[in-house]
Amino acid sequence: MLLDSWSPFFDVEKTLGEMDRLLGAMGQPLGLRSVQRGTFPAVNVYEQADAAVLTAEVPGVSAEDLHLAVLGDSVTLRGERKSEAGEGERYYRRERPMGTFERTLTLPAPIDPDSVTAEYRNGILRVRMEKAEEAKAKKIAVKS
């Protein structure tokens, strides 16, 4: 086997993209694969009849350090997890990420920005976003 020819074992990102494409061709929803390990914060997004809901794990971040923006069919979550170490303290082991973060996610439909509500409890952010009126299903009466 030539090393310069494409192999799924050497190009993981291309392989995952191809798996998404194949699952999409079989009618499976796209974008359900996990994100790169260590991506912070971990999020779930699910759809309700007239809304999209995002939950994010952001332990150790104060509500004042979380910033949320919705535009069209995307939502951006920004924040900062501040270091716990004081002046002159030194880490022996550091596994929890510190510093600023930003995640932008595409939602299943455009969102009404005036409908967005966010709650932060026990390190979990829950954001409920109603779909824009043009994205909601409309019931059509059938006349005979």
Image (spheres, rainbow, N blue to C red):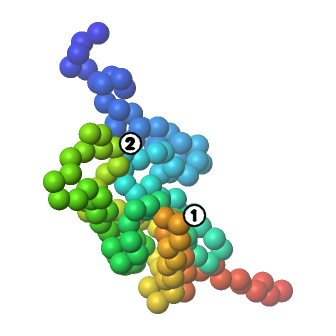
Name the residue rendered at 34%, 44% in the picture: 95
Mark 2, residue position? 37
x then y, percent, for residue 32: 51, 49
Q: Is residue 35 left or right of residue 46?
A: left
Q: What residue do we see at 26% from left, 56% from top?
A: 85
Whether residue 54 appears in this view of the structure is: no
In front here: 49 or 96? Answer: 96
- Visible in this render: residue 2? yes
Residue 134: x and y in percent read 52, 84
Q: Which quadrant of the figure contains the N terminus?
A: top left
Left or right of 15, for residue 140 = right
- State whether residue 61 is above or below residue 136: above
Circle 1: is it few (<14), some (14-19), or many (20+) Cα within 10 Å?
Answer: few
Residue located farthest toward the top when viewing the structure as drawn: 1
The residue that disc 1 covers is 46
Q: Amino acid at mark 1?
A: Tyr
Q: Find the residue positioned furthest to the bottom.
A: 114
